């Protein structure tokens, strides 16, 4: 959030597992950006490798049988939901 904003982190547990929610009031993403979000080496930053979310996806989904979803609105913010089985 280059111009500042708020980041909210919430946790919840139910019979199926654990839910982590990360919501920001940052720049948000377009539908095109969301569609490619977990591709390796994709970055919108001047400095960076574009591997962060690809690695997160591999750890959450592949290694732990979890699920990660994103909803985002340009200029309003983004929410990531991570669901992990217990």
Image (spheres, rainbow, N blue to C red):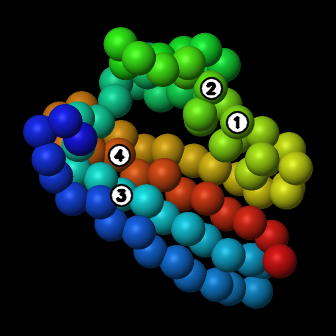
Q: Could you say where residue 23 lies in the image, as x and y percent from the top left?
A: 36, 57
Residue 79 visible, this angle: yes
Identify the disc placed on residue 33.
Answer: none
Q: Secondary structure at mark 1?
A: helix
Determine the image quadrant of residue 33.
top left
Q: Is 24 located above or below residue 29 in the figure?
A: below
Q: Secondary structure at mark 4?
A: strand
Q: Which residue does the numbered mark 1 point to in the structure image?
A: 55
Q: Residue furthest left?
A: 3
Q: Residue furthest front?
A: 47
Q: Quadrant of the N terminus?
A: top left
Q: Are marks 4 and 3 in contact (CB under 8 Å)?
A: yes
The Cα–Cα distance between marks 2 and 1, rounded to whole angstroms, is 6 Å
Q: Which residue does the numbered mark 4 point to in the structure image?
A: 78
**Callout 1 crowding tier (Cα within 10 Å): few <14, some 14–19, many ≥20:** some
Q: Residue at x 48, y 52 (%)?
A: 80
Mark 1 or mark 3, which is nearer the start of the sequence? 3
Q: Secondary structure at mark 2?
A: loop
The Cα–Cα distance between marks 4 and 1, rounded to whole angstroms, is 19 Å
Q: Residue at x 80, y 70 (%)?
A: 85
Q: Which residue does the numbered mark 3 point to in the structure image?
A: 23
Q: Which residue does the numbered mark 2 point to in the structure image?
A: 51
Q: Nearer the viewer, mark 4 or mark 1?
A: 1
Mark 4 or mark 2, which is nearer the start of the sequence? 2
The Cα–Cα distance between marks 2 and 3, rounded to whole angstroms, is 21 Å
Q: Nearer the viewer, mark 2 or mark 3?
A: 2
Determine the image quadrant of residue 76.
top left
Mark 3 or mark 4, which is nearer the start of the sequence? 3
Q: Residue at x 74, y 77 (%)?
A: 17
């Amino acid at each position: 959030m280059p111009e500042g904003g708020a980041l909210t982190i919430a946790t919840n547990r139910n019979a199926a597992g654990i839910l982590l929610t990360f919501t920001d009031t940052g720049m948000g993403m377009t539908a095109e950006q969301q569609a490619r979000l977990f591709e390796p080496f994709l970055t919108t930053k001047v400095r960076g490798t574009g591997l962060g979310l690809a690695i997160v996806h591999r750890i959450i989904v592949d290694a732990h049988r979890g699920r990660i979803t994103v909803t985002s609105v340009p200029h309003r913010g983004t929410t990531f939901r991570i669901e992990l089985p217990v």
